[in-house]
Amino acid sequence: MQVGDIPQKEYDYLLSMPIFNLTEEKVEELQRLLKEKKQEYDKLLNMHIFEIWSKDLDAFLEALDKHEEQEERDRLSHKGGTAGGGRKGAKKAPARKAVKDENSSAKKNKA
């Protein structure tokens, strides 16, 4: 093998690639996905860390509520299931207010 020669195994990924990956439509789809991801990245880059945290927390709390509702429906649909379950303690609304209060005070301190 001479200098500059590329071993054949370096091209194996091309030979094993499905032909539909080489279509113009696939290229356009990948370019569209790239554009969407760049927009999402720019949006996150311009957000304050507390905004991102608050948004993630809200999404988590919403998913948790849905999960708890499903668990409660499952518990009620199965007679003889264990009583109780679910989350115990304070309500979520005060926690959200506290989070938003922290965010607004952090923004004021930043300004």
Image: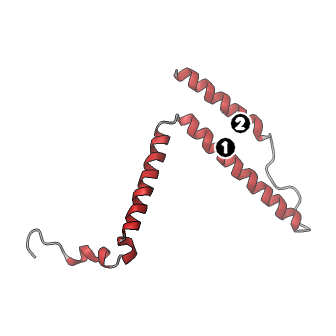
Left or right of 89 in this view: 15: left
Q: Position of residue 71 (x, y in %)?
A: 79, 60
Q: Earlier in the sequence, mark 2 or mark 1?
A: 1
* Quarter of the image where one finds residue 16: bottom left
* Quarter of the image where one finds residue 53: top right
Regarding mark 1 in the picture, which secondary structure is present there? helix
Q: Position of residue 108 (x, y in %)?
A: 58, 21
- Label drawn at residue 58: 1
Q: Position of residue 64 (x, y in %)?
A: 72, 51
Query: Residue flagged by tag 1: what amino acid is it?
Result: Asp
Left or right of 37 in this view: 1: left
Alpha carbon distance from label 2 to label 1: 8 Å
Asked if the residues shown at circle 2 and circle 1 are in contact, with their CB atoms under 8 angstroms apart, the answer is: yes
Q: Residues within 10 Å of mark 1 (few under 14, many from 20)?
A: some
Residue assigned mark 2 = 96
Viewport quadrant of the N terminus: bottom left
Query: Residue flagged by tag 2: what amino acid is it?
Result: Arg
Residue at the (62%, 38%) spot, across then down:
54
